[in-house]
Amino acid sequence: MVPTISIYIALLIFSFIITSILIVPFIDLLYRLHLTHHHYLKPTIKEETGVFNVALIPSQKLKIGTPIGGGILIIFIVSLLFAVTLSIYSKLGLAIFPLYSLLEELNILFFTFISFSLLGLYDDILKIFNLNQNKFIIKPLRKTTLTILLSGLISLMLYLNLQIEIFYIPFIGTITLGWFFVPISTLIISFFSKAFDITDGMDGLAVGNLLISLIAFWAISLTVIDSILSVFIALWVGSLIAFLYFNVYPARIWLGNVGSLSFGATLAVIAILLGKTGVLFLIGFFFVLEAFSQLIQVVVVSITRKPAFPVTPIHYWLQSLGWPEPKIVMRSWLFTLITAVFGLWLSEI
C-alpha cells in the first residue's frame, strides 16, 4: 500500500498537536532551569566593525528573560514521532520508498539533526551561563571548526555510503563532481548551518522562513517519492508551526543554537539528498543574504577598517533604519515565499 498525501498531512497535524500540548510545560521547565537570555552576549568582533552587537539595538533589552532552547523540544518530538511512524507504517503494511538505502539515509539524516543540535546546546550553555570556553574545550576547537568537521563527516557519509557525487544546477543540468563533492558539500552544509544561526536574531524570523523553505522541499520530496524525507519534513513542519505560535513577536521562547545550528545543516542535507542543491540557494535565498551581508562586512572591515553597512546582518540593519521588528519578519516571509515558488519552478527545469 502506497502512502497518500492525506497520510502525510495527518502526520503534520499530529506533530502540531503533540508540540502544542508540550510546549507550555517545556517553557516553564526552561524558566525553572534558568535557561533564559539574562545578560548581553559578548560580540565576537569589535563594535566599530558594524557586526551586530546586542548593545547597538535598544529593543534587544526587551528580550532579556526569554527562554532559550526550543530546538530541544522540536528535535525530541520529531525524532520520537518519526520512530513511531515507521513502526506504524510496517504494521499497516504501508510501503516505504527511500531514494537510497533506508538505513543509510536515516543514519545521515538523524546524525545531522542530532549532532549539530548537541554542538548548539553546548554553545548555548556556555553563553547562557557566561562560562569561559577555554575551561571546557581545547582552544582551536571553536564552534566554527567543529561545524566544519561535522559537515565534512556528513559529506563523507553522503559520498561513501550513498554514492552521491552530483549536484543539479538549473539551466545547466547535473554536474558529476567525484571526490570534489565532499569539500563542496562540506562548505554548503556548514554555510547553511551558520546562515540559519545568523538569521535567528528576531522573533519568528528564522523559523518562519524555514517553514516556507521546508514546505517547498516537502513538495519536491513528494514528486520524487522519497517517503523518508516526506515523513520527516511533515513531522518537522507540524512541530515548527506550533513552535512559531510562541516564537512570533513578542516571543515566549527562542530556538537557541541547539536548534539554529541543527536546522540550517539539516535543511542543506535534505536538499542534497533530493538532488536539488542548486535550488537550495534560491529557496533559502534569505538565509544566503543574511550570511553574505555579515561576510561582506567582515571582509570590508578587515581591508579598509570601515564597515560596508551600519550594522549586520540585514535584519538588524533594517531595524537600525527604523523598521519595526514584526514588519521586517513578515516581509522576509513574503520574500522567501516568492523565492521558494521560483525555486520550485526551477527544480523542474
Image (cartoon, rainbow, N blue to C red):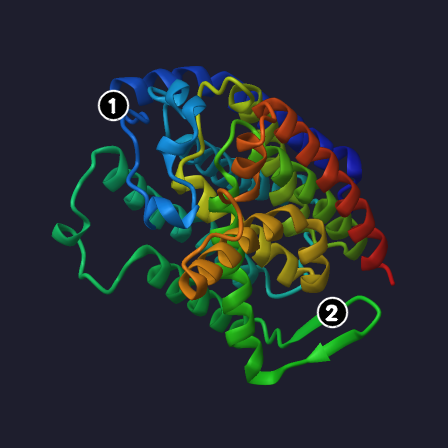
Say whether residue 63 is left or right of residue 285: left
- Image position of 150 with respect to 39: above or below: below
- Coordinates of residue 222 in the picture (x, y in percent): 77, 49
From the image, tell me which residue sits under label 2: 168
The quadrant of the image that shows the C terminus is: bottom right
Check residue 137 in the rendering and tell me which mark sits there, or answer none: none
Q: Nearer the viewer, residue 284 or 178?
A: 284
Label 1's element?
A: loop
Residue 265 shows up from this direction: no
Q: Nearer the viewer, residue 194 or 31?
A: 194
Amino acid at dot 2: Tyr
**Residue in view at x 72 percent, y 54 percent:** 282
Which residue bears the numbered disc 1? Answer: 33
Measuring 45% from the left and 55% from the top, which residue is drawn there?
A: 306
Q: Position of residue 167 (x, y in %)?
A: 68, 71
Question: Residue at point 51% right, 67% down?
Answer: 187
Where in the figure is residue 31, as x and y percent of width and height?
30, 18
Residue at 62% from the left image edge and 30% from the top image edge = 329
- 274 or 149: which is nearer to us? 149
For mark 2, give the secondary structure. strand
Residue 144 image position (x, y, % from top left): 37, 59
- Mark 1 residue type: Leu
